[in-house]
């Protein structure tokens, strides 16, 4: 009897051990599958590859609250986050394929297009090299005067019967004239009644060119701080009591203590809602150098088709410092900046009635004032 009982106990012990081993094996298999499902999806994300599957995951926004998807495993919070990442990768893949195949009016890609880089603001102009190693006034003056008296492009003269010939003058022989060559856009803009003219001045009485352009259909705005009224319409022109400056008014100074209503041209364009100016005429009595510098640094010249400018050479100009050679070098550098902005000199005018003064002296028989006409050869409104 005792030997039989020993064999039964041995059999029951083996069966119990076998059950324990099978249970442990099932637990290991379950843990292995659980870890495999967790590690599978992130591996695609780490490699940067979308998952290759045709299964469409149901939209979570379309599910009712409290309803569990029967195909969704009972994962924890971490697994749900991984599942959302996989769904996002699949969505990007589908969008990318749709864009490549031309599907939709606005195809999308995996990565959004890069925004164009904004030009960094400029704080000063680039000075040109000295005309000579000696830094002499004579060399600087000769280079500058040769530059402003040598047209770079030619413009076909306007028809004598045309409306743009200033009254009492012989066409292009007057101090102010625009370029009406068919290679540039001004003629077409006048024909379609879309041209806009800005005239900057101080007590300017001769508005012959402005009236001619206004009669031709241009939208003409004259800015003069000496006007008594803030805004006035006269002879198809708008007159504004504004002074164009190279800086805006100081907000720390009360308005009543500021003698004039001064603004930068960029500010005026923004206030008036104007994006382009076909003709910019400026006779600002020695403030032209600093105003021109501001237009260059702020990139306003890209909105201008033609620039008519009177330069005064009898002194350095407002807030222009340095010795005489440095002043002339600064003038020349400004005009070279104009050239780099695609402006080309098409005419100059030397008024014989003006005194012969160049920086307070009679030098190289230079006039104290020249009227220059520049056309932007890449301006397409």
Image (cartoon, rainbow, N blue to C red):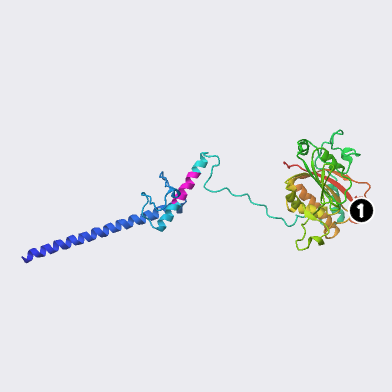
Residue 302 as seen in the image, left or right of residue 348: left
Which SS class for mark 1?
loop
Residue 244 % position (x, y): 80, 53
Q: Quadrant of the N terminus?
A: bottom left
Residue 37 as seen in the image, left or right of residue 164: left
The residue lying at 77 percent from left, 35 percent from top is 191
Residue 301 as seen in the image, left or right of residue 367: left
What type of secondary structure mainly makes up the magenta span?
helix
Q: Is residue 357 one of those drawn in magenta?
A: no
Q: Is residue 16 visible?
A: yes
- Between residue 114 and residue 46, name the one nearer to us: 114
The 10 Å Cα crowd at callout 1, few under 14, some 14 to 19, many 20 or more, is: some
Is residue 108 depicted above or below 159 in this figure? below
Chain part drawn in magenta: 86-95
Q: Quadrant of the C terminus?
A: top right
The residue lying at 27 percent from left, 58 percent from top is 25
Q: Is residue 134 visible?
A: no
Residue 295 % position (x, y): 76, 51
The residue lying at 65 percent from left, 52 percent from top is 118
Residue 312 % position (x, y): 87, 52
Residue 113 % position (x, y): 57, 47
Q: Residue furthest left?
A: 1
Q: Which residue is mark 1?
A: 357
Q: Residue furthest bottom?
A: 2
> Total of numbered circles in the picture?
1
Is residue 244 depicted above or below 305 in this figure? below
Q: Is residue 92 one of those drawn in magenta?
A: yes
What is the quadrant of residue 166 in the picture?
Answer: top right
């Amino acid at each position: 009897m005792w030997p039989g009982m020993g064999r039964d106990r041995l059999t029951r012990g083996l069966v119990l051990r076998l059950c324990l081993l099978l249970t442990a094996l099932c637990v290991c298999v379950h843990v292995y599958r659980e870890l495999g499902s967790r590690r599978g999806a992130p591996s695609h994300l780490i490699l940067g590859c979308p998952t290759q599957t045709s299964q469409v995951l149901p939209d979570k926004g379309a599910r009712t609250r409290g309803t569990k998807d029967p195909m969704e495993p009972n994962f924890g919070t971490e697994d749900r986050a991984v599942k959302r990442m996989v769904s996002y990768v699949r969505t990007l893949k589908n969008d990318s394929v749709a864009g490549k195949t031309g599907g939709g009016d606005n195809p999308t890609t995996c990565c959004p297009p890069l925004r164009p880089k904004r030009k960094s603001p400029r704080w000063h102009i680039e000075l040109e090299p000295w005309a000579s190693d000696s830094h002499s006034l004579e060399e600087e003056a000769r280079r500058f005067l040769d530059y402003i008296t040598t047209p770079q492009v030619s413009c076909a003269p306007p028809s004598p019967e045309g409306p743009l010939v200033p009254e009492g003058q012989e066409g292009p022989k007057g101090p102010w004239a625009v370029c009406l060559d068919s290679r540039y856009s001004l003629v077409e803009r006048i024909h379609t009644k879309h041209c806009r003219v800005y005239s900057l001045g101080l007590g300017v009485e001769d508005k012959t060119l402005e009236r001619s352009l206004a009669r031709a259909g241009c939208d003409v705005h004259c800015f003069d701080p000496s006007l008594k009224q803030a805004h006035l319409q006269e002879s198809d022109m708008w007159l504004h009591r504004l002074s164009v400056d190279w800086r805006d008014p100081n907000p720390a100074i009360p308005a009543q203590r500021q003698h004039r209503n001064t603004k930068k041209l960029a500010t005026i364009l923004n206030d008036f809602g104007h994006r382009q100016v076909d003709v910019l005429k400026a006779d600002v009595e020695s403030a032209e150098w600093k105003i021109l510098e501001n237009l260059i640094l702020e990139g306003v010249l890209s909105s201008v088709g033609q620039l008519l400018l009177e330069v005064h050479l009898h002194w350095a100009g407002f807030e222009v410092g340095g010795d005489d050679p440095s002043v002339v070098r600064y003038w020349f550098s400004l005009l070279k900046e104009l050239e780099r902005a695609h402006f080309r000199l098409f005419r100059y005018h030397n008024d014989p009635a003006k005194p012969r003064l160049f920086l307070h002296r009679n030098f190289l028989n230079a006039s104290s004032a020249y009227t220059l006409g520049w056309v932007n050869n890449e301006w397409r409104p």
